Image (cartoon, grey):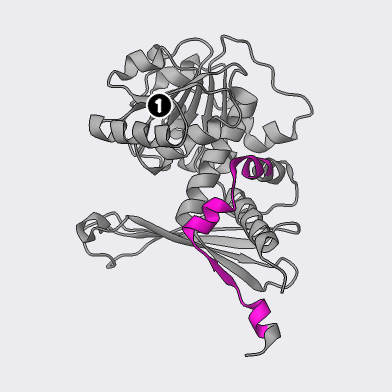
Amino acid sequence: MNTSELSSAPVFVDAATVARCLPWPELLQALQNAFAATDLSTPTRGHYHMEGMGSGSSTPVLLSMPAWSTGLGVGVKLVAVYPDNHQLSLPSIHGLYVLMDGASGRPQAVLEAGELTARRTAAASALASRFLSRADSRTLLMVGTGRLSQYLPLAHAQVRPIERVLVWGRSPAKAQASADALQALGLNAEPVTALEDACAQADIISCATLSKTSVLHGAWLRPGTHVDLVGAFTPQMREADDAVFERAASVWCDTLAGGLAEAGDLVQALASGALARARIRGELADLCRAATPMARADADITVFKSVGAALEDLAAARLCLDRLSRSRPAV
């Protein structure tokens, strides 16, 4: 193999390197630029049910999320969801991201997709919060104790002066562990056991659960709250009840196509009549492209619903590879 072949070989970027190369300020800016761009193509993600695969009774799913643009190149995320992997003591989700040069199609990098997805998901929520939450938001309630509970508070703290993080989960032990981990990362975090009481204290509520029934009730929200809904990524899942949408002054989503087709919170609220289609003001791209910030009254309740967008992965992967290239010593 000659030198030119070596220099053109795609690099593998592990999770630790992805984290190091995606600091929050730069990632937020990269996502804002991507959502504001007009040359991005993001086809509908593919869902493939793999009958006969896996080690249990559940059918695994293969997801593909492609995107491309002249500025960022070409990329696709491949994710395998194996619901019964707990029987093998393995995570249920595995994935890789393949990044290619836009001019030639040459593969440039393969990135570990778990860290990439977690960071870009949290950054998208924080980006929406920059436009939708009150500027003086200081208390954040984290509903859920999974992987994203370690990312969402950190990302939101980049755009708002978060002084206190409350963590709620169905398991008090997991809520304690999540709060302890956030404390170690420099945030003032504490577990809570009464979700309704915690909602009465929160300026921002970020939900990232796998719930199929509402855990967040609109009656609990105090005026001025911003609600960030990250779970419920299928029509059958739900985190917020109808009253959340009935009380909301404005509702936004990361992409309308994904939100209306896949976001259980939106799909079910629309079906019940609690949310009229006309009350969904738009998507994150509209906020990023607006010439002036969206006006909001201090008492307004705002809602942002994300299901994930392929352009977020592409923007994050390109940022990661660019920063990695700059950090390497010249030969």
Image point 61% across, 51% down: which residue? 316
> In the picture shown, does residue 46 fall above or below 152?
below
Q: Amino acid at mark 1?
A: Ala
Task: Where is residue 276? Give x, y as percent.
Answer: 53, 23
Task: Where is residue 123? Give x, y as percent.
Answer: 56, 40
Q: Which residues are magenta?
A: 5-29
Answer with the quarter of the image where residue 169 lies: top left
Image point 68% across, 67% down: which residue? 329
Task: Where is residue 3? Give x, y as percent.
Answer: 69, 85
**Kind of element beneath mark 1:** strand
> In the picture shown, does residue 85 fall above or below 127?
below
Question: Circle 1: is it few (<14), some (14-19), or many (20+) Cα within 10 Å?
Answer: many
Q: Nearer the viewer, residue 276 or 24?
A: 24
Q: Nearer the viewer, residue 57 or 293?
A: 293
Magenta-span inclusion, residue 22: yes
**Could you tell me if residue 46 is visible in this image?**
no
Q: Is residue 178 left or right of residue 325?
A: left
